[in-house]
């Protein structure tokens, strides 16, 4: 197993390195009849792009090219291949790293697994977060397919440094955080900007907690015992570079609560409902139809402008490293889009396994419904 693929019926395989010619993804299992364009993919990619003052200054257009699987503006049911060129690599920034693996990065792990002579040290090669642009490209397709059931995935930065948003904001606030330069709700935007600016001036970085909400998720997604929805979501989200923690519902708060405090009243209003949704929309690893609520923790990136101790691979003696280049002071800002995509990809795969989204072909009516809702989704918050 290469570890470069994800999914069962809706399967993605990403390829490319941080400073190679391009990043790309092959998406297999997209039903035929879905209206799809480069512009649809770019709509999601633009929220992950580097370039503003609060993230990496690397200048990438991230313009996608769909090079297979489309005919007359619709998917054919064959594999979709999407290519995103690397326009602004600067491998010269990594010449010192060639002999000095970076503390906190995957460098030494890749060296020991694949061999020092085979290690692509340019920005971490395949282990770089640059790879996630391919996930967001595939996630755009997944997000569009989920609209068949009016399911929407949205995330925001809930906490970073001394910023913490106690109550989950309303869904429109979360969705519209995509327009924020720091990917948080409007009322907390200036506070987070101050945190990021201070950290950047210090030559340091900071972590963050991202919360993802799934509105109108299909119920009954997930299989016992080892293919639970929660375990597949955890795998997808923990595969994101820099993610070090995952929880859903009340999550890690559980350790200090009593059973009587987390009992969630079941009621019926035409369908079974839960009064407080304490479980975050998942019980027994199966979706209940309530909003799915997830949170992940991003660590601070180790690429900082402070001297670090490491080993010189030429002589295996201690040395120091000063990292230069263009790095995110808070990787979670662009990580929100990646997390949304990983959730969407997982939900589409489970929806196909459950027969909720067609595996082979969309009807014209289904395609039109998706296209109408996609247009509304794109125009929201404008």
Image (tube, rainbow, N blue to C red):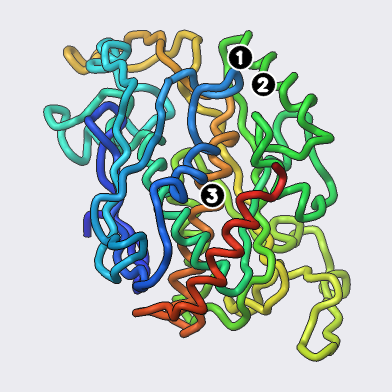
| Front position in the image: 305 or 172 | 172
Residue holding disc 2 = 196
Gap in angstroms between the C-alphas marked 2 and 1: 6 Å
> How busy is the neighbourhood of tag 1: few (under 14 within 10 Å), some, or many (20 plus)?
many
| Front position in the image: 198 or 350 | 350
Sequence-wise, the earlier of marks 1 and 3 is 1
Secondary element type, mark 2: helix
Q: Quadrant of residue 270?
A: bottom right
- Residue at image location 30% in from the left, 50% down from the top: 66
- Residue at image location 49% in from the left, 67% down from the top: 145
Residue holding disc 3 = 339
- Residue at image location 36% in from the left, 34% down from the top: 128
Q: Can residue 345 be seen in this view?
A: yes
- Residue at image location 14% in from the left, 32% down from the top: 118
> How busy is the neighbourhood of tag 3: few (under 14 within 10 Å), some, or many (20 plus)?
many
In the image, residue 257 above or below residue 191:
below
The reply to whether dot 2 and dot 1 touch (C-beta < 8 Å) is yes
Residue holding disc 1 = 200
| Front position in the image: 299 or 327 | 327
| Front position in the image: 139 or 250 | 139
Percent of width and height locating residue 247: 63, 57
Q: In which quarter of the image is residue 290?
A: bottom right
Left or right of residue 29: residue 267? right
Percent of width and height locating residue 110: 26, 36
Gap in angstroms between the C-alphas marked 2 and 3: 20 Å
């Amino acid at each position: 197993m290469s570890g470069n693929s994800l999914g069962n019926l809706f399967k993605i395989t990403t390829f490319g390195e941080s400073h190679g010619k391009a990043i790309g993804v092959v998406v297999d299992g997209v039903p035929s009849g879905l209206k799809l364009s480069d512009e649809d993919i770019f709509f999601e990619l633009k929220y992950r792009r580097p370039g503003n003052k609060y993230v990496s200054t690397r200048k990438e257009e991230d313009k996608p090219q769909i090079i297979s699987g489309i005919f007359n503006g619709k998917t054919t049911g064959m594999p979709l291949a999407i290519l995103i060129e690397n326009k602004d690599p600067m491998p010269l920034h990594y010449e010192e790293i060639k002999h000095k693996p970076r503390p906190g990065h995957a460098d030494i792990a890749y060296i020991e697994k694949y061999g020092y002579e085979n290690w692509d040290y340019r920005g971490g090669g395949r282990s770089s977060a640059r790879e996630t642009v391919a996930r967001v490209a595939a996630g755009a397709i997944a997000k569009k397919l989920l609209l068949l059931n009016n399911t929407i995935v949205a995330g925001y930065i809930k906490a970073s440094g001394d910023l913490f948003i106690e109550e989950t904001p309303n869904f429109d606030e979360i969705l519209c955080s995509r327009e924020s330069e720091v990917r948080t709700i409007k009322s907390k935007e200036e506070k987070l900007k101050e945190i990021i600016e201070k950290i950047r001036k210090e030559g340091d970085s900071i972590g963050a907690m991202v919360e993802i909400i799934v509105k109108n998720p299909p119920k009954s997604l997930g299989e016992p015992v080892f293919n639970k929805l929660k375990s597949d979501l955890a795998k997808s989200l923990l595969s994101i570079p820099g993610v070090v923690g995952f929880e859903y519902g009340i999550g890690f708060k559980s350790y200090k609560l009593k059973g009587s405090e987390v009992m969630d009243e079941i009621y019926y209003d035409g369908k079974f409902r839960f009064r407080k949704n304490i479980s975050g929309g998942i019980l027994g690893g199966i979706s209940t139809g309530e909003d799915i609520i997830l949170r992940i923790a991003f660590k601070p990136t180790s690429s900082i402008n402070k001297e670090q101790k490491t080993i010189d691979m030429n002589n295996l003696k201690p040395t120091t490293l000063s990292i230069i280049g263009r790095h995110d002071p808070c990787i979670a800002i662009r990580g929100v889009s990646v997390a949304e995509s990983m959730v969407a990809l997982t939900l589409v795969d489970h929806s196909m396994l459950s027969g909720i989204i067609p595996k082979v072909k969309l009807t014209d009516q289904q395609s039109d419904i998706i296209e109408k809702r996609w247009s509304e989704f794109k125009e929201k918050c404008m």
